[in-house]
Image (cartoon, rainbow, N blue to C red):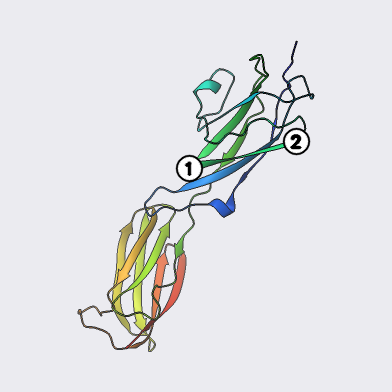
């Protein structure tokens, strides 16, 4: 009689290179999971099937089947080899729980693996470099906030005189574009030259240099 070996998930790591950021308040991330393939008879042969589940609630043998199945789950490799799968479209700022079961060719299933939990970090505060730069007509910036908060963005000339308030007030969480029409507070086109744009988000301060082309 075949016996499916307990299959531990041995690692879970954020796939940093695969981090995706949307233009709205919700962002998606990837987690890479790894484990050692069991056989279909302890550590001999090749198992027939995996069942990987994940959930925002802790997984147990009782609720395992209610977890979400990822796409592109690999077929079992020969016993002892490393298996890897990437779970995509996870929401930043959430905790996810992962667990695995394995079946042999007769449909016998292993017990549930250990449960791996991963905290998906939220977006960090950011204020991008302007684009295009040098700028003609408009200059755009990307503002990223991990949570809703007050934003103050102002433009200055090189003499330190404020020429334009670009933003002052609450902003929602996520990544948003901020567009400057290269005019001053009175709506007059600014002369070509170098300007500094200061962004203050809570206790974070950013300074960006914008060149207005003739």
Residue 176 versus residue 14 in the image, above or below: below
Residue 22 versus residue 113 in the image, above or below: below
Q: Give the x, y percent position of residue 100.
A: 62, 27
Quarter placement of the C terminus? bottom left
Q: Give the x, y percent position of residue 64.
A: 55, 22
Residue sitting at 32 percent across and 58 percent down? 170
Q: Which residue, given by chain and number where applicable, does mark 2 sit on?
A: 81
Residue sitting at 57 percent across and 43 percent down? 31
Q: Give the x, y percent position of residue 152.
A: 35, 67
> Residue 179, located in which quarter of the rendered image?
bottom left
Q: In the drawing, does residue 41 fall left or right of residue 198?
A: right
Residue 74 versus residue 210 in the image, above or below: above
Q: Give the x, y percent position of residue 96.
A: 54, 36
Q: Residue furthest top?
A: 1
Residue 128 vs residue 83, the one in the foreground: 83
Q: Are marks 1 and 2 in contact (CB under 8 Å)?
A: no
Q: In the drawing, does residue 3 fall left or right of residue 187?
A: right
Estimate the spatial distance between the alpha carbons at disc 1 and disc 2, rounded to whole Å.
27 Å
**Secondary element at image label 2:** loop
Mark 1 or mark 2: name the one nearer the start of the chain.
2
Q: In the drawing, does residue 37 fall left or right of residue 12?
A: right
Q: In the drawing, does residue 97 fall left or right of residue 214?
A: right
Q: Which residue, given by chain and number where applicable, does mark 1 sit on?
A: 89
> Residue 199, located in which quarter of the rendered image?
bottom left
Q: Residue furthest right?
A: 44
């Amino acid at each position: 009689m075949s016996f499916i070996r307990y299959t531990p998930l041995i690692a879970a790591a954020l796939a940093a290179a695969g981090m995706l950021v949307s233009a709205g308040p919700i962002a998606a991330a990837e987690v890479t999971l790894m484990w050692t393939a069991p056989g279909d008879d302890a550590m001999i042969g090749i198992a027939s099937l995996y069942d990987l589940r994940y959930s925002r609630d802790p997984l147990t043998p009782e609720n395992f089947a209610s977890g979400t199945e990822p796409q592109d789950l690999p077929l079992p490799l020969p016993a002892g080899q490393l298996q890897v799968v990437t779970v995509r479209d996870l929401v930043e700022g959430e905790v996810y729980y992962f667990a695995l079961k394995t079946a042999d060719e007769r449909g016998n299933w292993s017990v549930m693996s250990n449960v791996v939990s991963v905290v998906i970090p939220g977006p960090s505060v950011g204020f991008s470099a302007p684009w295009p730069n040098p700028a003609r007509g408009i200059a755009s910036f990307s503002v990223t906030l991990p949570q809703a908060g007050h934003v103050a963005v102002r433009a200055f000339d090189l003499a330190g005189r404020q020429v334009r308030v670009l933003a002052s007030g609450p902003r929602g969480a996520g990544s948003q574009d901020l567009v400057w029409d290269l005019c001053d507070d009175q709506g007059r086109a600014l002369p070509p030259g170098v300007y500094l744009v200061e962004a203050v988000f809570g206790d974070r301060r950013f300074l960006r240099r914008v060149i207005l082309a003739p």
